[in-house]
Image: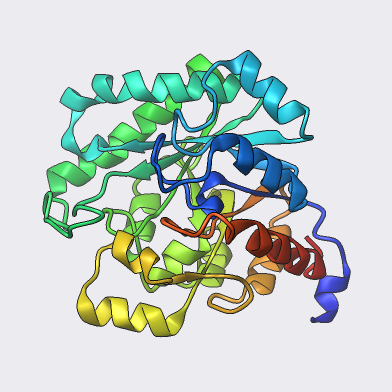
Amino acid sequence: MSSQSTSALDRLRVGSAPDSWGVWFPEDPLQVPWRRFLDEVARAGYEWIELGPYGYLPVDADRLREETGRRGLRVSAGTVFTALHRGPSVWEETWEHVSRVAGLTRATGAEHLVVIPAFWRDDRTARLIESPRLTAEQFGHLTSGMEWLARRVGDEYGLRIAVHPHADTHIDGEESVTRFLDATDPGLVHLCLDTGHYAYCGGDSLRLIETYGERLGYLHLKQVDPGVLAEVVREELPFGPAVARGVMCEPPGGVPELEPVLVAAQGLGVELFAIVEQDMYPCDPEAPLPIATRTRRFLRSCGA
């Protein structure tokens, strides 16, 4: 480790998420039960967790607080998927879902809502849902819609949104991310940098932090296996089958190198959540705990 890692990265609050236990859906027989996730994430040494897909963890706020509290866990954020580029006609329908997640998020004491754009192709079959390129009108709906969502979430629930660039969505790699950031209000719309998704889509996390660090509101820690990624690109696989093939790998075995990212994030001078998210759906239920434990040990060795 470099000399930089001997200093504690004391502005970063490290956590994990249901994603790191192979959880993508509210209910799925291939996923570990929610009680097992909570037990194991605490055992692995994490204090902070995300809610994951709405309905996976209990949606009754009192019960959720009791279940997390007795395990020494706290919630950092909720997550929503949106299709705001489709225009104001879908925004109110979107709000019905967002308001449920935001309400539960706020009730846990969390202050962040991670917002992921809709997929342009089916995550399992690769069937094209819509064009991977937005029209000028759709891009305008996306940016104005995200600002609308940020205002409403802030006004009604006191939460800050962090937009999550994601593979197979209209906000993915460097070109689309920087275009989106340049077109949105920096006082309203913050970025959730997922180091794995950004690398998957050809982006450089360090460069993004250096050039748009003031927009960073949240961090997801993830690595990509370059060899598997080359296969994914060559075969034009959608994200779901790519994950099943192992494109997202255990740190520190992939890219980007996480220690420089952590040091750069610490250098921004603000407190940030740094949540481990190793996409593993579907996975052997015995796999997540050992990986999560080793990952926590690795992050401690970096000073986090």
Evaluate whether residue 174 shows in this view: no
> Where does residue 234 sit, x and y in percent of width and height?
24, 82
> Where does residue 136 sit, x and y in percent of width and height?
14, 48
Q: Is residue 303 left or right of residue 74?
A: right
Q: How many marks?
A: 0
State the quadrant of the N terminus.
Answer: bottom right
Evaluate whether residue 226 shows in this view: yes
- Say if 16 sits above or below 244 in the image: above
Report which quarter residue 115 is drawn in. Answer: top left
> Where does residue 4 sit, x and y in percent of width and height?
82, 74
Q: Is residue 204 left or right of residue 87?
A: right
> Of residues 228 and 163, which is closer to you in this image?
228
Q: Residue at x 81, y 65 (%)?
A: 303
Q: How is the image coloured?
A: rainbow
- Say if 281 sits above or below 34 in the image: below
Q: Is residue 215 left or right of residue 169?
A: right
> Of residues 20 and 134, which is closer to you in this image?
20
Q: Residue at x 35, y 38 (%)?
A: 81
- Say if 144 sits above or below 100 in the image: below
